[in-house]
Amino acid sequence: METLLTLPTSPLQWAILSILFTSLGMEIFYHIFYIRSLRKEKNKKPIQNTEPLSIVICSKNESSYLEENLPLFLEQDYKNYEVIVVNDGSFDDTETILAQYQLKYPHLRTTKIPVDEKFHHNKKLAITIGIKAAKNEHLIFSSIRNKPSGNNWLKTLMRSWDKGVIMGYANFENKKGFLHNFLKFDLLLKSIKSSSFALSGNPHSGNGNNLGYKKADFFRNKGFAKQAHFEAGYDHLMVQQLGKLSGNSVCNHPNAKVNLCSENKLEQWTEINQQYYKCRKYFSRKTKLIIDTETLSKVIFYSFFIYALFFTDLYIFLAFAFFLRTISIISFTKICTSHLKEENLFLSSCIYDIFVLFSRLYFLCTNFIFSKRNQWK
């Protein structure tokens, strides 16, 4: 009777299996590492933080978003805060809308950068103007295109702010559709990864749509002077620099989520990735090694799995490796989505994981080949 279990018959087959299961073990290790950051955050005692704070929002020709979303920032269940809108040379109805809202909301303040055709600037100038206009020490940054998850967004975010920088969660809202949920899945992984690195003392990135730091730390760091020549990095590089000064806090709570605008979601997701990979050259060697090792382990697993599938008869070992990897991905996704109350990502996570790998390789290669200046629009 023929046995179903075929043992390796050559040193090459033993080597293939060894590499295959080693790369699988590395992936599982990363999943455990990321989950630990969620556990640390979950076990953290809530801090009743009632510090006065300022929300800084930069806007350029976004009057429709101002009219729709600004009240969501202005009607937060928080006692002492202000909202500062930096009008970056808008020529639409921005001024009119802001004036109308100021009559209703006394804690709304505005400042303006006049249009100057001879002087071109990026978003960093608008952010700096907003910071200088802020009355309070604690600063929260977001985009007017996005929406807080509810009126407890600010309160929940502040409860976790016990160190210099606070990194909040930002992603697209829950909707059906393969493309939409793939983009959500990729941003979820980025957020969990950024949180894990920050909590382990190696901050390397943060989402500028839900980010906070202290005014004193910003000026102590000399603002954006260290990256003035660089068009990107107003979020990722600031997280690195300010995290070294005063540490990082993380808030991956669903009530502290900022919902990204779903209009032109593919363009927005592409921009987020491009900004991230533009900043990679400023990451430390240690950070890049840890990040790239995870991606490399996936590439190695798929490469050796496909080779062994077509050129060996080690099907039982391959099935076992595939089963372990599937369980690891599904379990990891289940824990993350349950923690963040995200929907429609769990069952398709194994498929999304493959597309995420290809997207990472695509952005890594395109950023290496092309260098394109991306100004604040």
Image (tube, helix red, strand yellow):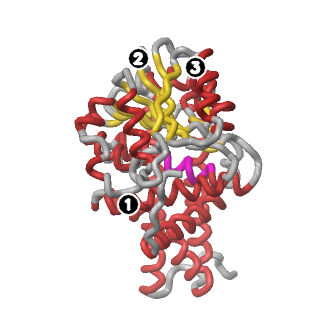
Towards the viewer: 229 or 355: 229
Earlier sequence position, callout 1 versus callout 3:
3
Disc number for residue 52? 2
Please name the amino acid that badge 2 sits on: Pro
Write down the residue under mark 3. 102
- Of the 4 image quadrants, the one containing the N terminus is bottom right
- Residue 352 sits inside the magenta stretch: no
Towards the viewer: 360 or 306: 360
Task: Identify the residue at image location x=53%, y=70%.
Answer: 362
Instruction: Give the class, few, some or many, for how many residues have Cα within 10 Å of label 3's Cα (few <14, many ≥20).
Output: few
Q: Nearer the viewer, mark 1 or mark 3?
A: 3
Instruction: Tell me if residue 249 can be seen.
Output: no
364 lies left or right of 219: right
Which percent across, then down, holds residue 360? 51, 64
Which percent across, then down, holds residue 314? 58, 78
**Which residue lies most toward the top here?**
79
Which percent across, then down, holds residue 132? 35, 31
Please name the amino acid that badge 3 sits on: Gln
Please name the amino acid that badge 1 sits on: Arg
Q: Secondary structure at mark 1?
A: helix
Q: Which residues are magenta?
A: 184-191
Q: How many marks?
A: 3
Write down the residue under mark 1. 280
Q: Residue 349 appears in which quarter of the rendering?
A: bottom right
Q: CA distance from mark 1 to mark 3?
A: 40 Å
Q: CA distance from mark 2 to mark 3?
A: 19 Å
Task: Identify the residue at image location x=51%, y=31%.
Answer: 85
